[in-house]
Image (spheres, rainbow, N blue to C red):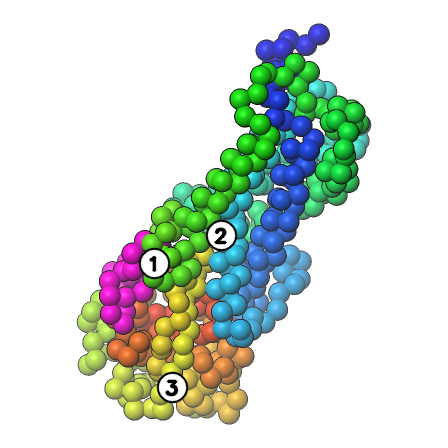
């Protein structure tokens, strides 16, 4: 008989809550939730248009993993706000479910012998990749949302490749376990009447229960609801944002007035000097077949100006409500550069450090009449932190592609 004090002994794990149906319910929730996370994560990556230009591609070695990429659309204008908001909010909400699921199957991690057959060995390998991948993806995701970059390397690269490894293990595990999970959910007879491999989570000498399984589900669901309530509000302005206590862009609005809405990088962080943006020194350089054209802010204000109501949405999952932007259409600047039809554009910022000092936009983004080189917001000139003297604003684009403190725009095939 195995020593009951060892984790490899079934008698070591005495909680009466563990069982096939408890694990099956959590597994079904994760099956749906993680699939949605994976799809919205792929959409988030596609939104950067990584095949357009190396400056947009944070994973240049992706190879076949980029098979699904497509030109990111500009309509509906709230597309990225929705997809990334769902991705981050759902990921945070599922954390208690994931932890409960891992707790429910922890005895299987210590099962001896490690492999009873080839199928069992494959299942154990997929389980290790699944557990490691889940912890890695959820941990790096939460750290990114909190703007705590404690991990080595780029978040984009780590999260992208980690997602493929994790989801491959998840898909393999789901294929092996889904029939069993469905059978456990449908079963009306007592759990111990099931197959031996389904009963290995049941303790042979369970301890006295301190909470019912219904109570345990309530605890997990309540924790998920709490995380949802204290994070989802960062995608809204007004009172709802003040409920988002667990994320950096939650809480009160940052000031009042036309520029009183969220930002990611301040001018000070980006190393922007006031003297560079002053009216007598700043010039926008627009280049194309017509050569280079230099435009000051006053000259831009004399061009035809247009307005658009658009949000800002970032990879961390936060967004603003629609702000009223006014400026010069990108397609008009393309025409000024010598293009009869809108072309791709490389936008460069005065910013000296940090990612996305340069960003590329596709011709379809330039062509949209709502895509602007914004000069004003909500009826007033941009503040320095919001990108004065000029910034990009494009419908449905990730926030980092809405370049601030624009210095140069180069139109042409990228």
Q: Residue at x 36, y 62 (%)?
A: 237
Name the mark nearer the viewer: 3 or 2.
2
Name the mark nearer the viewer: 2 or 1.
1
Q: Residue at x 40, y 61 (%)?
A: 236
Q: Residue at x 27, y 63 (%)?
A: 267
Classify 348 as above or below 187. below
Of helix, strand and loop, which mostly describes the magenta segment? loop
According to the picture, the residue beneath numbered tag 1 turns out to be 239
Q: Residues within 10 Å of mark 3 (few under 14, many from 20)?
A: some
Residue 252 is covered by the magenta coloring: yes
Residue 292 at x, y = what percent? 38, 86
Residue 385 at x, y = what percent? 27, 66
Task: Choose top left, top right, bottom left or bottom right for residue 134.
Answer: top right
Q: Foreground: 343 or 229?
A: 229
Q: Are the residues at dot 1 and dot 3 in contact (C-beta closer than 8 Å)?
A: no
Classify 143 as above or below 265. above
For marks 3 and 2, the one nearer the N-term is 2
**Residues under labels 1 and 3: Cα distance?**
31 Å
**Residues under labels 2 and 1: Cα distance?**
18 Å
Q: Foreground: 194 or 331?
A: 194
Q: Which residues are magenta?
A: 249-269
Left or right relative to 194: residue 209 = left
According to the picture, the residue beneath numbered tag 3 turns out to be 306
Left or right relative to 223: residue 69 = right
According to the picture, the residue beneath numbered tag 2 turns out to be 89
Residue 132 at x, y = what percent? 58, 37
> In what element is the residue under mark 2?
helix
């Amino acid at each position: 008989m195995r020593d009951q004090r060892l984790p490899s002994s079934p008698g070591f794990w005495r909680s009466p809550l563990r069982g096939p149906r408890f694990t099956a319910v959590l597994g079904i929730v994760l099956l749906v939730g993680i699939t949605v996370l994976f799809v919205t994560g792929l959409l988030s990556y596609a939104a950067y248009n990584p095949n357009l230009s190396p400056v947009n591609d944070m994973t240049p070695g992706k190879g076949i993993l980029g098979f699904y990429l497509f030109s990111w659309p500009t309509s509906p204008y709230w597309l990225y706000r929705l997809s990334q908001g769902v991705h981050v909010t759902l990921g945070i909400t599922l954390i208690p479910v994931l932890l409960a699921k891992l707790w429910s199957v922890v005895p299987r991690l210590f099962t001896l012998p490690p492999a009873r057959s080839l199928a069992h060995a494959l299942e154990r390998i997929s389980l290790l990749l699944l557990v490691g991948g889940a912890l890695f993806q959820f941990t790096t995701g939460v750290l990114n949302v909190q703007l705590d970059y404690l991990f080595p390397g780029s978040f984009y690269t780590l999260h992208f490749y980690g997602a493929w490894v994790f989801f491959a293990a998840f898909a393999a595990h789901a294929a092996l376990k889904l029939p069993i999970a469905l059978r456990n959910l449908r079963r009306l007879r007592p759990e111990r009447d099931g197959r031996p491999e389904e009963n290995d989570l049941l303790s042979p000498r369970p301890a006295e229960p301190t909470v019912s399984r219904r109570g345990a589900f309530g605890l997990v669901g309540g924790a998920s609801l709490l995380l949802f309530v204290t994070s989802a509000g960062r995608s809204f302005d007004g009172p709802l944002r003040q409920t988002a206590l667990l994320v950096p862009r939650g809480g009160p609005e940052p000031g009042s007035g036309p520029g009183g809405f969220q930002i990611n990088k301040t001018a000070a962080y980006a190393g922007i000097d006031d003297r560079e943006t002053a009216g007598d020194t700043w010039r926008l350089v627009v280049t194309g077949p017509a050569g280079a054209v230099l435009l000051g802010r006053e000259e831009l204000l004399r061009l035809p100006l247009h307005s658009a109501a658009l949000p800002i949405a970032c990879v961390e999952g936060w967004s603003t409500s629609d702000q009223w932007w006014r400026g010069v259409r990108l397609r008009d600047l393309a025409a000024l550069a010598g293009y009869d039809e809108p072309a791709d554009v490389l936008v460069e910022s005065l910013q000296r450090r940090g990612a996305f000092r340069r960003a590329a936009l596709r011709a379809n983004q330039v062509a949209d009449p709502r895509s602007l080189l914004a000069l004003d917001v909500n009826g007033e000139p941009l503040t320095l932190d919001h990108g004065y003297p000029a910034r990009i604003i494009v419908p449905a684009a990730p926030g980092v592609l809405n370049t601030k403190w624009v210095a140069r725009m180069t139109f042409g095939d990228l």
